[in-house]
Image (spheres, grey):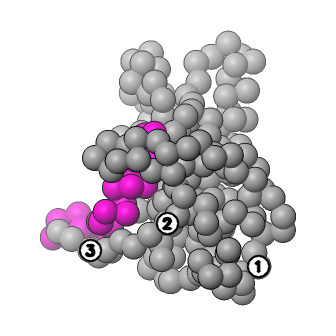
Amino acid sequence: MVSVLFTDFKGFATIAEKLTPEELVEELNKCFLQFDHIIDKLYSEKIKTIGDAYMCAGAIPVANTTNPVDVVKAGLEIKAYIDRVKTEREAMGLDYWELRIGIHTGKVIAGVVGKNKFAYDLWGDDLTTARRLESSGEPGKVNISGDTWELVKDHFNCVYRGKIKAKNKGDIDMYFVESRGRMLASRGFSLTKENAN
């Protein structure tokens, strides 16, 4: 059981055109360093960045059962950070990026590939679903699948969006995570579908 989080900036290309290459790299670096800090403290692993997209996962390479809660909490903290940046930049009359966040829990294949610049990476159908959760989301929202919701519903306040059509995946139950709910699971709590229901 792995929870995968994808982020992507809305309107990135439009704002990027107004920045110098140095400014663009500095802005992305500032954001991604903060994302790294958030996921590190929440027992998750950064997998890679692809342009303005960021991908991480909980429970790899070290398995755990709290990854759905950990990764959704990371998503909310990343959202809060971007919201603060947006407020600051708006106050200064500057352009700002808005972020879509998608999370799905399932099975993945993980491993190292390549010879030159080899990289630890993930593959699998559930990874594709996580990507679709991000692209089917809305800026400023944490969008999770029904599978993830089943595992975190006792810990977060969520709003059901209905079955949303996702490219090449059909209809997927999706929820927006609004806030933390009751006390989050302790690190020793075994979070499984059986005790989440």
Mark 2: secondary structure: strand
The disc at residue 112 is 3
Point out the tag, 1 or 3, that comes first from the N-terminus.
3
Q: Residue at x 73, y 26 (%)?
A: 87
Q: Is 122 part of what is drawn in magenta? A: yes
Q: Is 2 part of what is drawn in magenta? A: no
Q: Residues within 10 Å of mark 3 (few under 14, many from 20)?
A: few
Q: Residues within 10 Å of mark 2 (few under 14, many from 20)?
A: many
The disc at residue 186 is 1
Point out the tag, 1 or 2, that comes first from the N-terminus.
2
Which of the 4 quarters of the picture holds residue 22?
A: top left
Mark 1: secondary structure: loop
Q: Residue at x 26, y 74 (%)?
A: 112
Point out the tag, 2 or 3, that comes first from the N-terminus.
2
Residue 82 in the image: above or below residue 152: above
Please state which amino acid type lies under the numbered disc 1.
Answer: Ser
Judged left or right of residue 76, residue 39 is left
Residue 124 pos. (x, y %):
29, 66
Q: Residue at x 31, y 74 (%)?
A: 109
Mark 2 vs mark 3: give the one in front.
2
**What is the span of residues highlighted in magenta in the rendered image?**
115-136
Which of the 4 quarters of the picture holds residue 53?
A: top left
Report how far apart the C-alphas of labels 1 and 2 lie in the structure: 19 Å
Residue 25 in the image: above or below residue 152: above
